[in-house]
Image: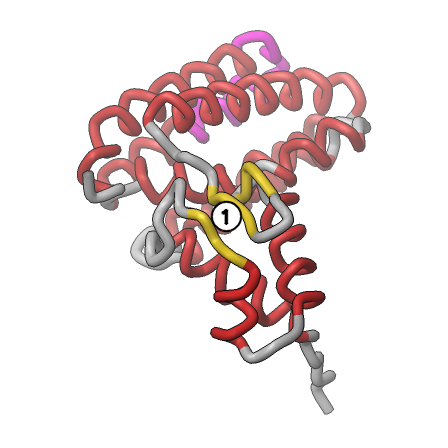
Amino acid sequence: MAEIIKKSLSEQIYDVLKEEILNHQIGFGKRLTNRELQERFGVSSTPVRDAINRLYQDNLIEEITKVGAKIIDFGLENAIEINELIGLLCRDAVILSAKNGDIDEISALLEESIINQERYIDDDEYLYYDYLFHLLFFDHSNNSKLREIYIRYNTLRSILVKCYYSNNTSKAESIIQHRNILEHYHAGNIKIAADTMSAHFEHAEILIKENYDKYFGI
């Protein structure tokens, strides 16, 4: 029998608010009030505060006050800065994983991830395998703090990914870039692999600038 997992009230509220923020049903920069959320969900203040704290940990909340919270202002400048940060993290993860891990083993896992990106290019599952491709370097970096930071920023990264993966053409371009990273990495050309990872995020910045207004409905 499959295990039935019951979610707490705070988890349910968190899931709803997170989905609404990611889908722009709650606008960036908007203020949420505890009282309105309590009335909406028919709950006390405790699960609302717990949900807001989790959103804060996801970097979706930039300010918490006594009466509520403020959603991040996800302007173009902020989006570019986040992309730059994640690119730097991924570049370092490439180098550390080669230093501390088994390159052949990691390369095999990267290849599997790329194959699944190709397989699911028409589906949302593509986004998971895109995330996994980068995460593999962190998993094998032997640096838990670096991995923790990357995972912490993954929610914001998912917003960026949906922005610049606006069609299958951009997804296909990313797959080619991933294969180039893997090719250099597997060959032991780690510096080139790291530089190629940096170029991968520089290309993403171009797509963010091109698609930002359209994606965020400005």
- Which residue lies at the image location 20% right of the left edge and 44% below the top edge? 217
- Magenta residues, dominant SS class: helix
Q: Which residue is mark 1?
A: 129
In the rendered image, the vertical position of residue 119 relative to residue 158, given as above or below: below
**Location of the C terminus (image quadrant):** top left
Q: Element at badge 1?
A: helix
- Which residue lies at the image location 42% right of the left edge and 53% below the top edge? 21
28 lies left or right of 169: right
Q: Is residue 174 visible?
A: yes
Across and down, in percent, residue 84 comes to 48, 19
| Residue found farthest to the top | 191
- Which residue lies at the image location 52% right of the left edge and 44% below the top edge? 60
Specify the amino acid type for callout 1. Answer: Tyr
Residue situated in front as seen by the camera: 48 or 151: 48
Across and down, in percent, residue 68 comes to 56, 52
Residue situated in front as seen by the camera: 211 or 196: 211
Range of residues picked out in magenta: 178-192
Across and down, in percent, residue 131 comes to 52, 42
107 lies left or right of 75: right
Where on the picture, by quarter, is residue 96?
Answer: top right
Q: Is residue 191 magenta?
A: yes
Q: Is residue 186 visible?
A: no
| Residue found farthest to the bottom | 1
In the rendered image, the vertical position of residue 21 relative to residue 185, given as above or below: below
Across and down, in percent, residue 155 comes to 53, 44
**Location of the N terminus (image quadrant):** bottom right
Q: Residues within 10 Å of mark 1 (few under 14, many from 20)?
A: many
Q: Is residue 134 magenta?
A: no
**Figure coloring:** secondary structure
Where on the picture, by quarter, is residue 173?
Answer: top left
